[in-house]
């Protein structure tokens, strides 16, 4: 993503226009819900993950709490943080997988874990909201991949395991930024570790099923910026920004490749 020291409106516009489909939809939902909550502040209460208000009739909170934010700055910094991570995830796994995970298990699992720990063990009732639960989920997943090729990094005489980086960031944000949920961020990171280690990959349907759905509905031809399961490495319009994947020379093989009470998740 363009750095602030080299800010260029043209490059920023180009970056936004090249975002893959699911990333666009989720970022738009975050901004849209923040805007909708200005004239309708009750939307925040309805979307927050509040332990005492949660029951089987409130399952929508598990899907909405990562998309809702306390205010503009909360939403703005969360969007900046998650956009490149979400884009990278979609470029690797495809649009249909990303959409199914981030509208389902990646909200339900960290949210459910938070409810169990906050209400069942700590006996608390702190409401949380914000997409930084996804930020730490994706950071933890990336940390596991990085750890396999670069197990440690050095700080002075100390060697720190690479996989601990998200946990260090969770601690730093909790100390430096007021009113963030330490437990909420930990729950997001925990699910990210499980995904990175492959323990919950069964949540994604088999690739043959996904390819059949894509071909049957002609999703690649009908939806702009759709990233196919078959072409997830290259996307519809070539390599997406920040993927770090080189373009091969020669033919490409076409085989599988707030005003409201509660704590915010994020700055």
Image (cartoon, rainbow, N blue to C red):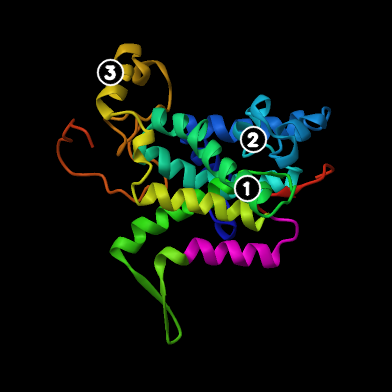
Image coordinates for residue 203, horizontal then vertical, percent: 39, 34
Label 3 or label 1, whichever comes before in sequence order? 1
* Picture quadrant of residue 88: top left
Mark 1 to mark 2 CA distance (whole Å):
9 Å
Q: Secondary structure at mark 2?
A: helix
Q: Which residue is mark 2?
A: 30
Badge 3: residue crowd in 10 Å (few <14, some 14–19, many ≥20): few
Q: Secondary structure at mark 3?
A: helix
Q: Which residue is mark 1?
A: 78
The region drawn magenta spans 165-180
Label 1 or label 2, whichever comes before in sequence order? 2
Image coordinates for residue 51, horizontal then vertical, percent: 71, 41
Badge 1: residue crowd in 10 Å (few <14, some 14–19, many ≥20): many
219, 208: nearer the viewer: 208
Q: Magenta residues: mostly which secondary structure? A: helix
Q: Residue at x 15, y 35 (%)?
A: 251
Quarter of the image that includes the C terminus: bottom right
Give yes or no for contact between labels 1 and 2 (Cβ–Cβ under 8 Å).
yes
Badge 2: residue crowd in 10 Å (few <14, some 14–19, many ≥20): many
């Amino acid at each position: 993503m363009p750095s602030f020291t080299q800010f260029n409106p043209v490059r920023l516009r180009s970056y936004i226009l090249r975002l893959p489909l699911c990333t666009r939809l989720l970022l738009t939902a975050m901004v849209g819900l923040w805007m909708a909550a200005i004239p309708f502040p009750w939307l925040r209460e309805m979307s927050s993950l509040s332990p005492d208000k949660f029951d089987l009739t409130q399952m929508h909170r598990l899907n909405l709490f990562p998309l809702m934010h306390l205010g503009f700055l909360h939403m703005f910094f969360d969007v900046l943080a998650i956009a490149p991570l979400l884009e990278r995830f979609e470029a690797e796994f495809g649009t249909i997988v990303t959409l199914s995970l981030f509208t389902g298990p990646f909200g339900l699992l960290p949210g459910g874990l938070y409810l169990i720990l906050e209400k069942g063990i700590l006996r608390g009732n702190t409401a949380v909201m914000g997409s930084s639960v996804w930020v730490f989920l994706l950071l933890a997943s990336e940390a596991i991949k990085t750890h396999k090729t670069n197990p440690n990094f050095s700080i002075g005489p100390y060697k720190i395991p690479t996989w601990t980086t998200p946990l260090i960031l969770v601690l730093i944000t909790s100390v430096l930024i007021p009113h963030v949920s330490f437990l909420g961020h930990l729950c997001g990171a925990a699910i990210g570790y499980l995904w990175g280690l492959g323990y919950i990959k069964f949540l994604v349907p088999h690739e043959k099923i996904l390819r059949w759905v894509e071909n049957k509905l002609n999703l690649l031809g009908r939806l702009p910026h759709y990233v196919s399961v078959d072409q997830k490495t290259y996307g519809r319009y070539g390599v997406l920004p920040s993927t770090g994947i080189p373009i091969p020379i020669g033919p490409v093989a076409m085989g599988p490749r707030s005003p409201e009470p509660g704590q915010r998740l994020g700055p």
